[in-house]
């Protein structure tokens, strides 16, 4: 009797753990982190594949992943409009970071980590760009 109770408790524990693990992994995105000193980083929103960007962390140039009609992928450089705040760049260092919201694409931001100058992702018929937040 004691052995069957121990076996039952063990089975319940294993079932609970495996169910919790399956739930937690099925709801999480896969994220890899670039090395702190890496020049380039690819980031993707959890909202949609179309919000996939390649950031040059030193220069602040951002590329968006696009597909041609025949499905060929390429990186399309995005426009970034001049900011009224200083936009300093330290040679050889990380100067920019992208923040991607899990709530809405409009809450996607590019920031100069040296000055705090921030741009918001803006979409239009002619393409997506980075518009300064004042």
Image (cartoon, rainbow, N blue to C red):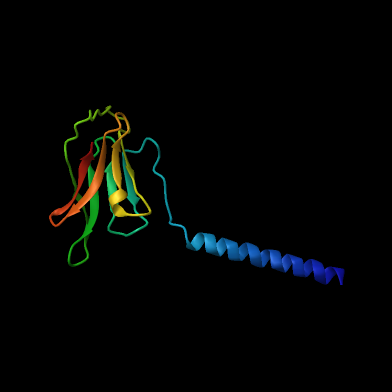
> Does residue 57 appear anywhere in the picture?
no
| Residue drawn at (14%, 57%) of the image | 125
Question: For the image shown, how many numbered marks are present on the structure?
Answer: 0
Image location of residue 123, percent across then percent down: 20, 53
**Quarter assignment of residue 38:** top left
**Quarter assignment of residue 86:** top left
**Quarter assignment of residue 39:** top left
In the displayed structure, would residue 69 be above or below residue 43? Answer: below
Quarter the C terminus occupies: top left
| Residue drawn at (70%, 67%) of the image | 12
| Residue drawn at (71%, 68%) of the image | 11
In the image, 8 versus 100, the foreground residue is 100
Identity of the residue furthest to the left in this view: 126
Quarter the N terminus occupies: bottom right
Identity of the residue furthest to the right in this view: 1
In the displayed structure, would residue 51 be above or below residue 82? Answer: below
> Does residue 95 appear anywhere in the picture?
yes
In the displayed structure, would residue 122 be above or below residue 85? Answer: below
Image location of residue 127, percent across then percent down: 16, 54
Left or right: 42 in relation to 2: left
Left or right: 81 in relation to 1: left
In the displayed structure, would residue 70 be above or below residue 129? Answer: below
Image location of residue 55, percent across then percent down: 28, 43
In the image, 100 versus 6, the foreground residue is 100
| Residue drawn at (18%, 62%) of the image | 68
């Amino acid at each position: 009797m004691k052995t069957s109770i121990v076996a039952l408790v063990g089975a319940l524990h294993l079932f609970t753990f495996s169910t919790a693990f399956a739930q937690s992994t099925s709801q999480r995105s896969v994220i890899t982190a670039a090395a702190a000193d890496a020049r380039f980083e690819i980031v993707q929103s959890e909202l949609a594949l179309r919000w996939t960007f390649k950031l040059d962390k030193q220069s602040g140039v951002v590329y968006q992943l696009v597909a041609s009609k025949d499905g060929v992928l390429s990186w399309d450089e995005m426009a970034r409009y001049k900011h009224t705040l200083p936009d300093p760049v330290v040679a050889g260092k990380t100067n920019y970071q992208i923040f991607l919201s899990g709530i809405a694409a409009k809450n996607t931001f590019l920031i100069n980590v040296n000055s705090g100058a921030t741009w918001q992702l803006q979409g239009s018929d002619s393409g997506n760009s980075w518009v300064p937040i004042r």
